[in-house]
Amino acid sequence: MDRFFSSVWSVAAITFLTAALPARPAHAQSGSDEREATKQRIERLREQIESSEARLSETTAAERASEQELERLDRRIAERSELVRLYEERLAEIRRAQDSLRRSLQQRRQRLTELKKEYKRRATHAYKYGRLHDLALVLAARSVNEMLVRVRYLRRFAQQRKEKLQAVQSASRRLETQRQTLAQQRDSTATLLRRAEAERENLSRLRQSRRAMIQELRSRQSSIEETISEQRDKKKQAEARLARLKQAARAAQRDAPTSASSPERRAAFERLTGSFEQNKGSLPWPAEGVVTEEYGLQTDPVHGTKTPNPGVMIGTEPQAQVQAVFEGKVTRIDKLPDLGTIAFVRHGKYLSLYGNLSLVYAGEGQEIEAGAPIGRAGTDGAPRGAGVFFGLFRGSTSYDPTTWLRSR
C-alpha cells in the first residue's frame, strides 16, 4: 500500500512539474548553482560575523567606559562618605560644646540669680533700716583704726559685689553669644550634612544604575559572542560543504563520459535529424537495459491494486550511464519520493524525464546535445533499485516512451 500511495503521489507530482515547471526549490539545485549558493551563504555569514564582531567591540568599549565611570563614582562616593563622617564629627563636637556652654550658662545664671537675690535682700534691708546697719558696724569699732578698717572693708565689699555682678552679667552675655554662634554653626553643618548625604544617596543610586548597565552589557556581550560562535560554526560547515561540492564536481567532471558508450549507440544518436516529433520511433534508449516496469496502469501482485505509471523503468547495471535521447535544454533538476533525483530536458513542446538517478552531470539551463550524459542510473539502494526511470510528456499529458524509442 505504501508503494501504491507513493506511486500515485509521484504521478501527481510529475504532472504538476511538467505542466508548471516553476523555479526549482532550494533543495534541488544543480551542482554549480548549489556551489554558488553556498559561496553566497559563506559571504553572508562572513558579513554577519564582521557585523557581530563590530557590535561586540562597541559593547566591550561601552562596558569598559561604564566600568571606568563606576570606578569614578566609587571614588566620589568614598569622598562624600568621608565628608559626611567629618560633618558628623563636627556636629558631635558642636553638640558637646553646646552642652558645655549650656551648663556654664546655667551655672552663671544661677550665680547671677543668687547675686540678685542677695542685692535684693540688701536693698530691702537698706530701705527698712537705711544705712544704720553699716553705721552701727563702724561705730561699734573699739578704736579709730578699727573704724577705718571697717569703713574700707565695707567699701571694698560693696565694690567687689558690684564687680562680680558685672562680671557675671558680662560672662552671661558672652556665653549667650557663643551659644548663638554654635547654633548657627550647627545649623550650617547640619545643612551641609544633609546635602552630602543626599549626594551620597544619588551617587549610590547612580552606581546601582551603572552596575545594572554593566550587567546588561556583559549579557549582551555574552549573547553576541554566542552568536559569533554559531555564525563561525555555520561558516565552517558551509565551507566544508563547499569543499565537498567542489570535490564532487571535480570527481563528476573526471568521471563524466563525453560520448556514447559504444559505436552502435553513437551511430544511433548521429542518425537523428529533424524535430523531436519527427524522430518518434527512432529515438535511442537513454540507457542500456531492459524494461522492468511498463507504462500505464500496473497491478500490484500482492494487493491487486492498480497504480498509474507515467513512464517506464529500465533496469540497468548500478550507476550505468544515462544519456539524453535528443538535443534540448535541461529545465529542472528535482527530487521525488518514489523516483529519487529526476531531470527534465525540454525538446520544443516535449519533455523527457530521467529519474532514479544516483548522480547528475547536467545543470539547469544547460543546452545539451543528443547522447550527452545526463547522469548515472540508480544503485540497489535507490528508490527504484538499479536502473533509470524514463518518461515523455507534452504539457501534462504523458506518452508511452517505448513507442518513441527505437525497437530492439
Image (tube, grey):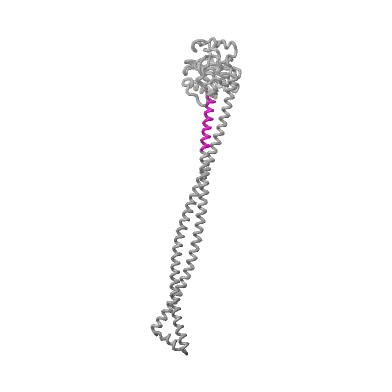
Q: Please give the name of the residue rendered at 56% of the width and 34% of the height, measured from the top-left corner.
A: 232
* Quadrant, the C terminus: top right
Residue 116, given in percent of the width and then of the height, sits at 42, 77
Establish if 130 lies above or below 382: below
Please say whether residue 315 is visible from this viewpoint.
no
The total number of labels drawn is 0
Residue 90 on the magenta segment: no
Residue 294, given in percent of the width and then of the height, sits at 54, 16
Q: Toward the viewer: 370 or 390?
A: 370
Residue 49 on the magenta segment: yes
Q: Toward the viewer: 194 or 391?
A: 194
Q: Would residue 165 be found to the left or right of residue 304 on screen?
A: left
Q: Residue furthest bottom?
A: 142
Q: Which residues are magenta?
A: 33-54
Please say whether residue 144 is visible from this viewpoint.
yes
Residue 134 found in image quarter: bottom left
Establish if 194 lies above or below 134: above
* Quadrant, the N terminus: top right
Q: Toward the viewer: 366 or 396?
A: 366
Residue 298, given in percent of the width and then of the height, sits at 53, 18
Q: Main secondary structure of the magenta part?
A: helix
Establish if 347 lies above or below 84: above
Q: Toward the viewer: 212 or 116?
A: 116
Q: Residue furthest left?
A: 127
Residue 260, given in percent of the width and then of the height, sits at 58, 14
